Amino acid sequence: MKRSFVVLAVTALLCLSACVSIVGGPGGISPSQFEFLPIVPVRAPGPGGWKSARVVIHLLHVTEQGIRKNVFCPIEVQVPEVNYLGVVTDQFAQWEAARAADIAAERTLKHQELLSAELCQRFMAEMLEVLGEAVDGARVIKAL
């Protein structure tokens, strides 16, 4: 049975703001939803330091029959302040995190048979795969 997917990815900065965006739609997930804050300072020349952004990804899958499946995935995206290629600017990290989240949400929701926890794990793995290609040393983990 062919099912159509309507994918909404909603991100909300924990306790700060919310934004609704349609994956693959105009604009996708806003890069501004990924507010990177320093967590480990750069201590010496060369690679080092870390910054982190916490967001809640809301995956919504709606079938042709109108069955809705809501999944909330609290994640933390971590990137180095400096990697072997140079400084990882906040703007670049935000842009790449948003792009990776859009792609990951679209890929993840193709697996409708997964349970909620499995969807979150799949989303994080997909996002890390995409983000890691653009930002060497990036991490995507479950936020506490």
Image (cartoon, grey):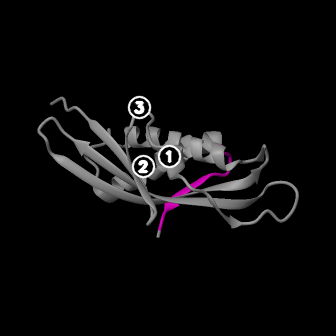
Q: Which residue is mark 2?
A: 123
| Mark pair 1, 3: CA separation | 20 Å
Give the mark, 1 or 3, whose residue is nearer the N terminus. 3
Report the mark closest to the observer, 1 or 3: 3
What secondary structure is found at the residue carrying circle 2? helix
The picture places residue 44, in percent across and down from the top left corner, at 87, 62
Q: Secondary structure at mark 1?
A: helix
x, y percentage for residue 126? Answer: 47, 45
Are the residues flagged by discs 2 and 3 in contact, CB closer than 8 Å? no
Q: From the image, state whether disc 2 or disc 3 is nearer to you.
A: 3
- Dividing the picture into quadrants, the one containing residue 28 is top left
| Direction left: furthest residue | 65
Tag 1 and tag 2, C-beta contact below 8 Å: yes
Name which quarter of the figure residue 51 lies in: bottom right
Q: Identity of the amino acid at label 2? A: Phe
State the extent of the magenta-drawn residues as a range: 135-143
On screen, residue 29 versus residue 97, left or right, reads: left
Q: CA distance from mark 1 to mark 2?
A: 6 Å
Residue at the limit of the structure toward the front, as seen here: 17
Residue on which the image places disc 1:
127
Residue linked to disc 3: 26
